[in-house]
Amino acid sequence: MQPDLNIHRARRVHLLQTLGEGVLILATAPEAIRNRDAHYPYRFDSHFYYLTAFPEPEAVLVLIAGGKARSRQILFCREKNQEREIWDGFRHGPKAAKEIFGFDAAYPYSEIDKRLPRLLENQPRVAYAFGADPAWDNRVMGWINTVRGKVRAGAVAPANLTDAHALIDAMRLAKDAHEVDLMQRAADLSAEAHRSVLRLCRPGMGEWEIEAELLRSLRAGGCEAPAYTAIVAGGKNACVLHYVGNGQPLRDGDLLLIDAAGEYHGYAADISRTFPVNGRFSAAQKDVYEIVLAAQYAAIEAVRPGNPFITPHEAALRVLTQGLIDLKLLSGEVDGLIESEAYKPFFMHKTSHWLGLDVHDVGDYKIKGVWRDLQPGMVMTVEPGLYLRPADNVPETLWNIGIRIEDDVVVTETGCRVLSAAAPKMVHEIEEVMRDS
């Protein structure tokens, strides 16, 4: 499945209409040095890619708004260079980029400092991601100051500054059908990676071996990269929310928490599963697991249009708190324990976040202090958990049980659809896959 370039152009047209008048400037991400002269694998800026589908570094999008007749879509990108392409790979160059990606004009990236001041002359405002990159802030302000320096020649500099990211965030929050298809593919490939490690896992293996199999499966399926650094946390490591060391052996009798997923054409999945290293839940592990699973089902049921974003978290929290009472880790009434946040030693994070081109995707969660309502096309995670560390009030049979179950859901007209449903999470499903492998 390839990006639909007509969709990206339509997004630019919509943004031009939203901008009304002025110039929008949006740079893609720079290449990043890993050490000395070795680079990290390149990953474009999500806002830039959303509007262009252009995958190369050293590229800038310029949109000039001012009515249909005067609006222009311009790309600055690297020139063709045979020697650099021998060393580093293919470049589109301005001519091909203009034709393939549907721009009105494309110029060499090296000409941007010469051309941008002219494009900014007599424009009422500039939309740009102010504050995101100090070097680019200085560059944009330098272009504006160049225009200000021509005031005696009759040039007028932009007087209004607008946050470009805020304009694009509003567009990105609700996904269109094409985006949902890409996210479904990312979720399917990620679910298969989780199934693969279920079949592989055995006591005595290392967390790193499980991570290696996740990465192998994701790349073999067609994901360009992992969507984030995998968490492969056995035993007590599962009680560290962002554990990424992935360097310890897996012990018989422990649980293994995996939070890992892939990125497909820029779109992320985000899946967590927890299962026994030896393929069989102990009675205590199963008790805790079933509480978290019930909390997740309650939260997923609450993902429906019109519900405030916080509603799934509140639904999960009630189930988790009652479960902690049943486990005799808390005592009292559910409402009072939630109000006092007595659950927080065992569940200290929210249940959901937006998902899309970024794992923690763009979009405000509150509007004027009020939780925003869910709308069709919004994609979010649902990931309750319980983390039981050794403590005086925790029975030893529950020590070092860390469980998180996370799925990706898209809000529909009538409720929601779970994109990551192919990753096993019922106790009998997990044990069956591991037993039959």
Image: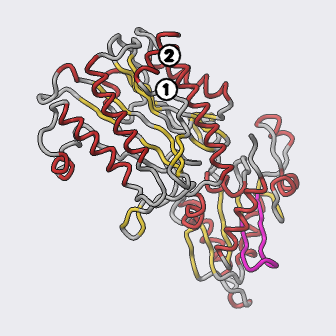
User: Residue 282 in the image: x percent, y percent?
Assistant: 30, 16
- Give the structural element (helix, strand or loop) at label 2: helix
Which residue is painted at 73% across and 79% down in the image? 66
Identify the residue under disc 1.
424
Mark 1 is surrounded, within 10 Å at the Cα level, by few (under 14), some (14 to 19) or many (20 or more) other residues, namely many
Task: Please report the bounds of the magenta region as a residue range.
Answer: 62-76
User: Which of the labelled discs sits on residue 433, or is there none?
Assistant: 2
User: Residue 194 in the image: x percent, y percent?
Assistant: 52, 25
- Give the structural element (helix, strand or loop) at label 1: loop
Taking the magenta stretch, the answer to whether it contains residue 70 is yes
Magenta segment main secondary structure? strand
The reply to whether dot 1 and dot 2 touch (C-beta < 8 Å) is: yes
Of the pair 159 and 272, the residue shown nearer to us: 272
> Residue 6 vs residue 276: left or right?
right
> In terms of image quadrants, where is residue 10?
bottom right
Q: Is residue 2 above or below residue 287?
A: below
Give the mark, 1 or 2, whose residue is nearer the N terminus: 1
Amino acid found under the numbered disc labelled 1: Pro
Q: Is residue 226 above or below residue 352?
A: above
